[in-house]
Image (spheres, helix red, strand yellow):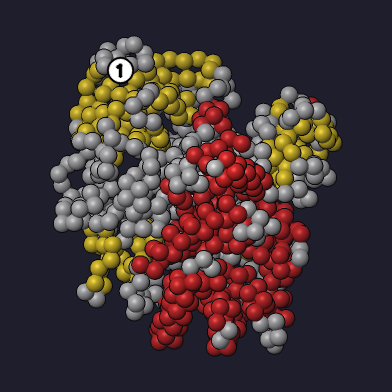
Amino acid sequence: MRKKSFILFLLLISHVSLFSQNVLTGDALLEKQIYETGFIHAPLPLDTSRSFEENALKKEVLSSQPLTETDGTNGWTHSGAGSMAFSNEKSTSGKGSIRLTFPTDTGKRAVGSPSDPDYATYGNSGITYHVNGQNWEKYNRIVFSIYPDCDGARIVNMNLTFTNDNSTAKEGYNPPSGSHLINLVNKTWNHCFLDIDECQRDKVMSIHFDTALKGKDRTTGDSAIYYIDNIQLQQIKAPGKVSGWTPAEDAIIYSTTGYTTNSQKTALVHSLLCNQQTAFQLINSATKEVAYEDALQREQTTIGEFGVIDFTAFNQPGDYQLKVGKILTPTFRIDEKLWDNSLWRVLNFLFCQRCGHPVPSKHAACHTDLFSKHDGKSISYSGGWHDAGDLSQQTLQTGDVTFALLEAYNRLKTGNIPLAARLLEEAEWGIEFILKNRYGDGYRASSMGLLIWQDGILNTKDDIHSVRVQNMAFDNFLYAGYEAYAAMTIERDPMLQEHLWKIAEEDFSFAIEKFRKDGFDSFKQMYEHSYNTSESQYMATISWSASMLYKLTGKSCYAETAAEAIRYVLDCQRTEPLKDKDKTRGFFYRNPSRKSIVHYIHQSREQVYMQAMTLLCETQQQHPDYQKWVNSIQLYGNYLKSLMKYTQPYGMIPSGVYHAEEYKDSTSFYALHLFPPSNAQDLYTEQVKRGVKLDKEHYLKRFPVWFSIFNGNTAIHLSTGKSAAICGNFLKDEELLGIGREQLYWTVGKNPFGQSLIYGEGYNYPQMNSFSSGEMTGEMPVGIRTLGNDDIPYWPQTNNACYKEVWVTSAGKWLSLIAEYE
């Protein structure tokens, strides 16, 4: 018995040692949390200590003034469900608070707009404090405390809307970006703030607090109560930066996760620091000794003047801090396997977004009474991952993320076994959703816009039977490629492999038959992320999918289809130089008419062009067109290299080249730009001209042209970064691989705001818009945007959709890009 116990002990020690070596580098707390969640089978805890909000609350307060009367409801009005009252029950000020009470169930069906009736909540409940034109220009922050007392509610949040009378807009101020969503912790006081330094506030009319009635999850009680107290106006020192390229004067802009060894390692400071300091230091966090130091460089680029820190020559793994004068960064890592910790966190975000599966502290098994209908049959649309901060679903988006998880698994399966196994398990969850929504005749349940929790009981008022069903050739081409890749990847389930092989061929057959009969799909569902698909992207997708089927089956018909489809794509690539000094070329047009260049506004599949080209080269090396494919890859890679000077010394890939009159191609223009204003063509011209003029007809834009709520850059630059890395790996080009890495660095803090866009990863990560599932470790937003017609980054604290809305697409792009690196 003793001998058996000793053997078990040795096995446990061996397992722990393996885990420690293979999973994490220098983060014992994360390792402990991963164990405690059963390898991400419960959400990782939130680390708010390194968040933007925690850091901002430490800023020096220069002056403060109470805003509201605290002995009654004077100045307050109520709207929507429930009621408002003055209360002495809970208070941080000791003078009472305003209490908002409302029922969680209205007894009625949620009804939205006539065009999308099931995208609806049960209403709102809110309170407004009327200021009636006060001047708040000597204050730059609103602070307040909220106590949610909501029985059974796992997720609680509230919106704050700040309103100024902007009948006469003043130059130099940005308008509020909509309601500010505040994620809260139930049954405790939450101390909150909103910086308003950027907002016009010479004639403030009101502040408004409200929250949506989203239905009842399993544990939700019958009513909700929110107490609001101690509202103050403050003047703080050094309010946060919200726009522009120039770093704050008291900040070092760096990758807060760290840097990979044997690659470029740079950071940025305000150019004024170059007048005060001549050198920087790299400090070993453990020993506090200077590990490396060098001169601080002053650089003038197309976006301004900067101080640049370059420590590329230093490659000793470990934990470090950068120091310039009195400015010292938090600790970051230099390591070969830098990104594995981020994969655990992003995987956690995906797990928290699971639909139809109980997620502890988030929600019960959900949306089992949400259905699609086709040909007399019905399928429950429960499964996959919720699309974003709401509860919407898109089958193709689940497919995209599943493929990214499988890519990451294949990269890690021999080097980090525990993480790879968990990535594979999450991918299998996505595969199940892809398979269950097939009707077997080319049709699939495709998408559903959703805002509410449902009761899970059939034949009650909240049942929904309006899930969209479509037979789209484009979708089936993508599914076939994903299924083929999964069939070649999932070796532990031979029967699933066999089934995936079978349906990959079936779905490709459905797609090619429909395409040959009807041509390019007519994309009718603007809310689906395939809506903006160009003809060249479509043909690249056919080629990539056919090559994937050829790799799986060895059947020559797929090889022939892949090579034939790519000829259309090659005809859409710009091979002749523009008339600019760099002779720019290599980008793709939407179709051979060459009226419009390929762009994206928040979703992106830019990487499919290079996925198709390189997979052709891999699978058909003896083909007569092989050199044409290689030339295309080289042209596109050089195009990406030519773009990078326009955002230096940052590393974000610009949106690319625009023709001055793309709006004349109205079909493409309105496929790309959803809900455009009536003056969209004029706005297009204005935005394009705020880019860099290349020649008489072409401009370089750092950020996309966009007009509506659908904007944010994360998926766009990560997709293009994926393209750069694909080219870099194929061409053995370190410069292109470095461009891909820079997209990772930008995401975790090497951006003008010094903020990580992955919650819990690195430092200074902000709250994000997730009104259905609350804050989640690893969550990622749609991304940094621009303001108005400018071509400069804009990232206010205001937490609103869609730029700050969490999005599984961004998570998938992150996984997919990292999969390109060993």
**Identity of the residue drawn at 58% across and 88% down:** 556
Indicate the position of residue 31 as horizontal and vertical percent values: 58, 40
**Identity of the residue drawn at 39% across and 63% down:** 433
In this rendering, the answer to whether 579 lies above or below 787 is below
Residue 43 in sight in this render: yes
Indicate the position of residue 743 as horizontal and vertical percent values: 64, 52
**Quadrant for the N terminus in the image:** top right
**Which quadrant of the view contains residue 814?**
bottom right
Q: For mark 1, what is the residue?
A: 90
**Identity of the residue drawn at 71% across and 63% down:** 728
As drawn, is 261 to the left or to the right of 699?
right
Q: Residues within 10 Å of mark 1 (few under 14, many from 20)?
A: some
Circle count: 1
Indicate the position of residue 5 as horizontal and vertical percent values: 56, 42
**Quadrant for the C terminus in the image:** bottom right
In this rendering, the answer to whether 374 lies above or below 685 is below
As drawn, is 78 to the left or to the right of 183?
left
Q: Nearer the viewer, residue 599 or 157?
A: 157
**Which quadrant of the view contains residue 522?**
bottom left
Amino acid on which the number 1 mark rests in the picture: Lys
Q: Nearer the viewer, residue 470 or 237?
A: 470
**Identity of the residue drawn at 39% across and 61% down:** 394
Residue 686 in sight in this render: no
In this rendering, the answer to whether 20 lies above or below 279 is below
Q: Nearer the viewer, residue 613 or 789?
A: 613
As drawn, is 345 to the left or to the right of 324?
left
Indicate the position of residue 717 as horizontal and vertical percent values: 59, 55
**Label 1 SS:** loop
